[in-house]
Image: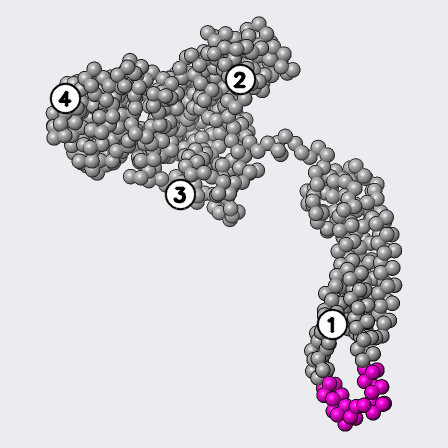
Amino acid sequence: MAVPTNIEELAHDVRNAIYGSQVREAIASSMEATADVADWARQVAQDIVDGKFDEGLLATEIENKLTQLEQDYAPTLTALETEITDARGSYDDLASRLLDITSNVNDKVGQTEYNQFKDDTNAELAEKAQQIDLENTNNSVSSLKIQKADTSYVDNKVSQVQSGVRGTFSTLTELESVYPSGDTGNYVVSSDGHIYNWNGSDWIDTGIQYQSTGLADGSVTKEKTDFFIRTRNLFNKATASIDTILDSSNGNTGYHVSHDTSDFIEIEPSTAYVKNVRGHVAWYDVDKNFISFVNQDTAEAGVSLTSPSNAYFVRFTINKSVPPNSIEIAQWELGTNTTDYQPFRRLKSDLVRLSTESYEDKSVTIDKVDFVKLSRNLFNKNTVTSDAYPDPSFNGTLVSNTNHDASDYIAIQPNTTYVKNVEGHVAFYDENKVFISGINQSTAQADVSFTSPEGAYYVRFSIRKSAGYSIETTQFEVGATPTDYVPFGKILDEDKVILPYSGIDNNKIIDVYNKRKHQGKIMNMLGDSITYHFPLSFIKDVLGLTEIRDYGVSGTTLSSNGTDGMVDRYDSMDDGDIIHVMGGTNDFGQEVPLGTFESTDPTNFRGALRTLIEGLVTKYPDKIIVFSTLPPRYHTNQDATNGYNASNQHPREFAEATREICQEYAIPVIDIFANAGWSKNNRDVYIPDGVHPSSEGYKKIANLIISKLNEL
């Protein structure tokens, strides 16, 4: 006969119950069900006595049932015996193990918690002992029940330890300093997240990980909650006051349609700052009390200002009536010279990680994927002049000498401390590389720092080979103390990238980066004033070029004028690996005829394009030749004619002619006219005079050129 269904269900409850109350209920129910079965058996026995059962059939039935019970329960009892043995472990019985657990928990909790724990445990043991004495229950099931109840009990007690924490400290040292003689209760150390308690002589790590490590008093600092780092631009356009101006008498703001005013910007006293826009300046003390005022006639764009000795805040205005002044391009920074615009701040990547889904389409720009920066070693061994040194006493020119090797010009900042790890002469130069002064090698010893003079933007130095120094280990860096040698070049910018695997070789990544397709090449740029004023260093650095030669001449056309048209002077360019041509602006401005598609006359625009392309292909048959269309132009004197000149020509026609003629010769085209991103509506930002790009406009063009060249 199979076990009754209700008995099976109750037995299952006993095996799987977790809490003591559940176990007791399950056992009680099983006892009641067992009693019912026993009552049934008693009735059967009575029937036998009364002669109502066939004894032969009953004997056979009993034999069959006993056999069936043995088959049904033997595996289960064997499994239960195994489970009980595993639960008991190395102990003689479960009670011994439970007592040992009690002892261990006593080591991990404070005395107060332990006393309560001990009382609860003794009561629980007494109750379990009574249950064990119930002979009419299955002994194996009872043993299993006790083991399960004790596991739950210990878990509950550990939870009590965690919830009974009295305080949190950043480090164990801090905990020991506050309570050198101990304390009752438990404390969390947030450096490892563990619970500690006093054992009478020392603070002991219980090994228990607290469910939440908590925050110690004073542990939440500004740096830990600031997910942004400042760029060199200290001006935050998001907090600017629109249509306001500073009062020269008290530094307060008032309404003015031509100005916008910055918020208070934290600064240092007696320090040089510079801004790239015209506008008034007001200085304030540490409590933001007004100190003094600088009129915009003095505080011109690009003019450095030194903060007063008691100034800790500054506000300045942006004169919107003077293009291209705008809060969109305004920059306030440390130093005496303006630099390229940067946004106010950006995410600190080691604190904030965004998933792939967090980025919108087209939101990843060049600056976001430029994961490298220059190493601290500013000396490039690949550009040295062998057997020479810069003259430190007269004019800074190179002097032939086999005992020295000379560095190339290295860009530096004035009034800044530098150090090198080799002995050799030093020469300083201004921004035009004109010699200023020098230091003799007897003073410019290895590991001895020196300060660049006022107006110095370049330096050259020698490596004295005769004294055992070598260009292979030379390092020149900012600071007063030399650091361990690192190679010159690019390294990963840890502010911008987090490597997913610690085993990645940084040097291999940089090696791949430095082996860009145009690394070490020379580029010639042929053009007009837009090319002449181009910030070429940006393209040079991003592409890894050795040199960019500027063949831009202001006012010149692409077509021939008999003297300096691009088609007239291209042949005088030196050899190069990449040839870039951008023209058409002055052809439009001077109303040069467009010409027919088939024309070869260099005095019209299409004919000049054909002549120039064929000449360049002949001069540079195996080099990269690429043309750019003219940038969009929106001169105010053409607003009334919708951009047409007096000959009814439009700039787009010159762009179209460039595209179609270049296509005829399979010459790549960078379509700046169609993709520069500016129009009449925002020309003040990108082309303030309607023709020539601002720094922001040049960045747009440069990115288009870089993007195209990376495809070739």
Residue for point 73% across, 51% down: 207
Nearer the observer, disc 3 or disc 1? 1
Disc nearer the start of the sequence (1/4): 1
Task: Identify the residue at the far top of this view.
Answer: 249
Q: What kind of element bears circle 2? A: loop
State which region is magenta.
41-67
Image check: 385 left or right of 597?
Answer: right
What distance separates the C-alpha of mark 2 from that of mark 1? Answer: 79 Å
- The residues bearing labels 1 and 4 have C-alpha atoms spaced at a distance of 107 Å
Toward the viewer: 599 or 529?
599
- Quarter of the image with the N terminus in it: bottom right
- Mark 3–mark 1 distance (CA, rounded to whole Å): 73 Å
* Type of the residue with mark 4: Thr
Q: Which residue is mark 2?
A: 241
Check disc 3 and give the amino acid type.
Answer: Val
Q: Nearer the viewer, residue 577 or 559?
A: 559
Q: Is 46 colored magenta in this rendering? A: yes
Tell me which label, 4 or 3, sits earlier in the chain.
3
| In the image: residue 397, left or right of residue 468 | left
Residue bearing the label numbered 4? 603
Residue at 78% x, 93% y: name it. 54
Disc 1 designates what residue? 6
Relative image position of residue 162 (x, y in whole percent): 75, 48
Instruction: Rate crowding at label 4 as few (under 14), some (14 to 19) or many (20 or more) other CA atoms within 10 Å.
Output: many
- State which quadrant residue 666 falls in: top left
Q: Nearer the viewer, mark 2 or mark 1?
A: 1
Q: Please give the name of the residue rendered at 69% of the width and 82% of the height, measured from the top-left corner.
A: 71
Assess whether mark 4 and mark 1 are in contact (beta carbons under 8 angstroms). no
